[in-house]
Amino acid sequence: MARLEGRKAVVTGAASGIGRASAELFAAEGARVLAVDRPGSNLTFEHGAIASLGVDLAEDASPKAIVDHALEAFGGLDILFNNAGIGSNALVAQMTDEQWDHTQDVNLRAAFRLSREAIPHLTKSVAGRIVCTASVMANGTDYGLAAYCASKAGVVGLTRTLALELGKWGVTANAVLPGAIRTGMTRQSFDNADVAAVWARKSVLRRLGEPIDVARVALFLASDDGGFVTGQTIAADGGMTLRI
């Protein structure tokens, strides 16, 4: 039997990378999926179980629009995968308020607001699941990554508290921490063979990660296989952080 047979899921940031791989994997495992990303992004899928919705997650009306669309399309909600995120690179001394706020709005505030909107429906599910994409940079940092690291550390803190507050309804909440993954957000860097080789060497597996590597972790956390795992962070980094 498929691991998500009959489940109803929302996946944000689903036009490319980890989100797209996860939406397709969830559907292949029996779920009906609402794939969400920005208006105008590529939300065309071959799998008939994937519906799509183009919204800007930073807008105030988006969480209700997403949950309402899922309820109308599927009649319920079992899985929320808060995956959408953006990169940010600016030294603190030069960072504008707008750069800081936009990173927090997309990476953290949107996950909080969408989770809040979904909670009344997830608590009615026989297997409610929240999965969030954080980053190994939730536990680390580098030059220019203040806004990004703060947002991803916030995602981890939010996820742990969701797990604590929702456990009495059997709802789990966990975060996956990708390392160096070849996605749309990282393409500009990793299309450079020399840069890609450096980051591949940082992994003990000697390769960059692919979106499906993270999608498989998300599937575990969204399925019954991960039903006794909650409040946890799982690094999908090829062992990169073993040496940090």
Image (cartoon, rainbow, N blue to C red):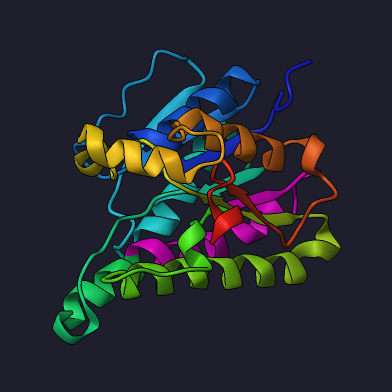
Instruction: Tell me the residue at 29%/57% (across/down).
Output: 87
> Can you say which quadrant of the picture contains the N terminus?
top right
Q: Is residue 47 above or below residue 78?
A: above
Residue 8 visible to an observer of this rendering: yes
Q: Is residue 48 above or below residue 72?
A: above
Is 119 within the magenta? yes
> Magenta: predominant secondary structure element?
helix
Is 17 within the magenta? no
Q: Where is residue 32 in the image (x, y as percent from the top left)?
A: 57, 27
> Toward the viewer: 17 or 36?
17
Q: Position of residue 33 (x, y in %)?
A: 52, 31
The image quadrant that residue 26 belongs to is top right
Residue 13 visible to an observer of this rendering: no
Highlighted range, magenta? 106-131
Q: In this view, does 78 lie to the left or right of 227?
A: left
Q: Where is residue 49 in the image (x, y as percent from the top left)?
A: 52, 20
> Toward the viewer: 24 or 138?
138
